Amino acid sequence: MTMEIGVPEGHGGKKMAADGQSALARFGHGFVAGGWTMYPVLLLLIIVGAFIAPRFLSFINIINILEQVSVLGLTTIGLTFVLLIGRLDLSLEGVVGFAPMLAAVMLVPAAAGGFGVELPQWMGLIVALGCAGLIGLFNGFLVVKVGLNPFISTLGLLVLLRGGILIISNGRSIYSPGESLTWLGSAQIAGIPMAVFVFLIVATVVGLVLKYHRYGRALYAIGGNEDAARAAGINVDRMIWSAFFFAGLLAGLAGILLTGRLDSAVTTQGQGIIFSAFAAAVIGGVSLGGGRGTIVGVVSGVLLIGVINNLLTLAQVPSFYVQASTGAVIIIAAILTTVASRRSGGVKTRT
Amino acid sequence: MEQIRPIVEMRGISKTFGSTRALRDVDFTLEEGEIHALLGRNGAGKSTLVSAMSGYTPADTGTIRIASTEFNVDGSSYAARIRGDIAHVQQTPQMFDLLSVAENLFLENDLVRNRWGMVSYTRMIEKTEKLMRDWNMDIAPSDLAGELGAGQRQLLEIMKALSRGVPVIILDEPTAALSNAEKRVLFDQVKLLKTAGVSFVYISHHLDEIFEIADTVTILRDGQVVKSRASVEGLDTETLANLMMGEKTTRSAREDHTFGDAAPLLSARQVQLKPDRPKIDIDVRPGEIIALAGPVGSGKEDLAMVLAGQQAPASGQVSGPNGALPTIGLVPTDRHASGYVGILGVRENVALGGLEVLSGNFGFISKAKEDSLVNRLTRQTDVIASSLDQAVSQLSGGNQQKVVFARALCRDPQIIVALSPTRGVDVGAKEQLYALLRDLASKGLGVIVVSDEEDEISQLANRVVIVFEDRIVDEMVGDYRMEDLILHMEGAT
Ligand SMILES: Nc1ncnc2c1ncn2[C@@H]1O[C@H](COP(=O)(O)OP(=O)(O)OP(=O)(O)O)[C@@H](O)[C@H]1O
Ligand SMILES: [Mg+2]
């Protein structure tokens, strides 16, 4: 029968939430809701990988994977902000390329392909992040104030930014854009790339904020039912602005890591990353409809994609097979996530 | 010669959701041409039982016969087999917001197909117009369903079910979102169909309606039948309430806690709800419970939303004593549209109202504070759920409403604006919520209630403000009598 969590004084004995659910069922539910679904799969993949390619589990290779996924990871975490409120942002891919490129052309001398403004070195990081944040705010403006559908507005912006990269760079990549822009993506601490730390720190902070901060609570509520969030006293418009802002900012940071790793702002930088970011988010259990998803899950999605790519490369699968197999894996992983969440939650009919 | 047998027979119906045994070995019969009221407190299993009947949510075990279709239930779907015999108006609205009224009414309906199986729009519009005339409603067939008010949407769903021409119709709290006038239209139509031999299962928490429309009563408590097929004659509201709640419930009377000459908590000055409407001035004082009453479309809801700071007036301003708005807790009219977040748990939903109150350093939520506050509020509002983590979409309708109520209190408000606060709430919990509001008023809160129910208003309000055509036309303060209240409320139309 039904347990009562709030029993009125007059309604006889007090029964607290002594949940009759089995411990196993509760564990299963928490496991899926917490975003841990894909970790067993990841573990399996790692075991298989160790057998296929002995080099797979070497320290160098693991660091290599982590460095590779840090860019995708930051972009996906950024995307998660907007997905949680039931929106999307395709322009993040453009930001990954545009923000560092803008900073680069503002820094380097005209002879090296710059604008000739030659801003002081230390401004690099600020220009790139500032530009990324502004693009995010502009997305927020289009969605909140103008009322555009984010699919259309961010798609337009994506194409615009891709073109913009070519315009400001004159179609040429810019090499060695300066220490402040490249340091995060190239420095190492005790043999571990700075990029890995950046990714882990951002993931931890955002993970904590989503789970324990009122900002996170408000994001989930808006994704679940925007009108209810509004009626509960949440400033929904400001939340939407901020989600797009953080998304842009993190994509910009991802772009900076990439520029640092290559020691150059490349015109094709970030191309195609938005597809992987969506895949990673969905594999990690983020709902495209909003209101569901965790950073624990997002990280699993990102790692899964990274590990698969790495394994395929190590196993010397021809590169054009890599892309197709990644696609296949995305579908399989998405099926797994869906089945798991349907099993653990929702309506269950007992036999 | 064939003996007259019931049109619906259900035997040994059981249904379990996770750890909740929503129905335990329930028998239910419905005679032909009868209006059978199904009663019980929030979470008793009423909606679950009728969902088992229509196949919307199949039961786990039992046998069911509807008209000439008989089958054993094993948890698998059977809705399609009985679709031609039964219509089910659910407690949660099932409209397609982006389809027109006509499309919503005649979705999957053979009456509007031409001989090649294509939908005939002209026929659909014609039929819709005729229905609107019969029901005395002023809605264009091409209006989008999403733009209608809660009452009109509810009526549309009922119209859809009633026009399908089936012998059994389930109405799960059909009047919860209806005004008195709309209720009259519904009852006329139901009685009309009853004389034509149609049978109804009727669920409601308005016990006076039962005596007006029902023939027979069955009462559920904790998933079991406690009273089977009693005739309404020889019963009264008090007996019904006691049977439902399993204990004595008494009707409370209003109390006056108005702090006589205290400064108002909230003042509206020169407020226009719509351009070129008269200007409204109103003050909310500490300890006062104000009821806004008036017919549908009178603007009482708009006025409440303006006072709550959720809607901008066409002109004028609303402010607290020192210019800034006080903290306001809101219970919105339509809990499904803007009340709860279905995929989130009870805890998150309640806490949502008070994120500022619950968060400490750097805006992180304090778990201890959250636990104690949410526990207290859900107890005060009588929320019944399997745990605080249960998704609110899985709660019974009345319990969802209580969660919304608890959420409004969570921010520790100075003013509560509650639109139809007890919609779908059972008689016992209703009294509990009334007591809670009175208690808050006695502590100096201002309370604004929007209601269509005379009983609710007279049990709560120290001041009744009648709104009509976007202005305040009448006001009653202090010790008014019930007869006067009814006169004033009807006088507005
Ligand atoms: N999908 C679901 N998942 C889990 N539990 C459910 C689900 N649907 C209903 N329940 C539980 O089953 C019990 C009966 O619910 P039901 O909706 O039938 O109550 P009700 O009598 O209609 O109440 P109300 O008057 O509030 O509408 C409740 O305890 C409810 O929480
Ligand atoms: Mg119900």
Image (cartoon, coloured by chain):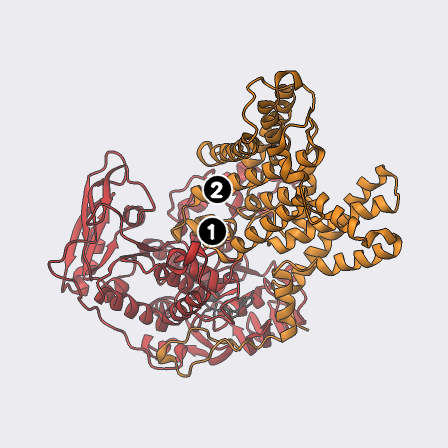
Chain colours: A orange, B red
* Label 1 residue SS: helix
Q: Report the chain holding disc 1.
A: A
Residue B36 appears in the rendering: yes
Q: Say which residue label 1 marks.
A: A215
* Label 2 residue SS: helix
Q: Residue furthest left?
A: B261
Left/right placement of residue B443 relative to residue B195 reads left
Q: Is residue B25 above or below residue B271?
A: below
Q: Residue furthest bottom?
A: A13
Using the rendered image, report if marks 2 and 1 lie on a common chain. Answer: yes
- Counting from the top left corner in percent of width and height, residue A15 is at 46, 80
Question: Going 53% across and 41% down the picture, which residue do you hit?
Answer: A246
Front residue of this view, candidates A268 and B253: A268
Front residue of this view, candidates A276 and B483: A276
- Counting from the top left corner in percent of width and height, residue B293 is at 25, 54
| Amino acid bearing label 1 | Tyr
Q: Quadrant of residue A157?
A: top right
| Amino acid bearing label 2 | Ser
Circle 2 residues within 10 Å: few <14, some 14–19, many ≥20: some
Q: Quadrant of the C terminus of chain A?
A: bottom right
Q: Is the residue at mark 2 in contact range of ligand 1, meaning its CB lies under 8 Å from it?
A: no
Q: Is residue B62 above or below residue B164?
A: below
Q: Report the chain holding disc 2.
A: A
Q: CA distance from mark 2 to mark 1?
A: 10 Å
Are the residues flagged by discs 2 and 1 in contact, CB closer than 8 Å?
yes
Left/right placement of residue B141 relative to residue A263 reads left
Residue B242 appears in the rendering: no
Question: Going 84% across and 46% down the picture, which residue do you hit?
Answer: A312
Left/right placement of residue A297 relative to residue A65 reads left
Front residue of this view, candidates A310 and A194: A194
Circle 1 residues within 10 Å: few <14, some 14–19, many ≥20: many
Q: Say which residue label 2 marks.
A: A242
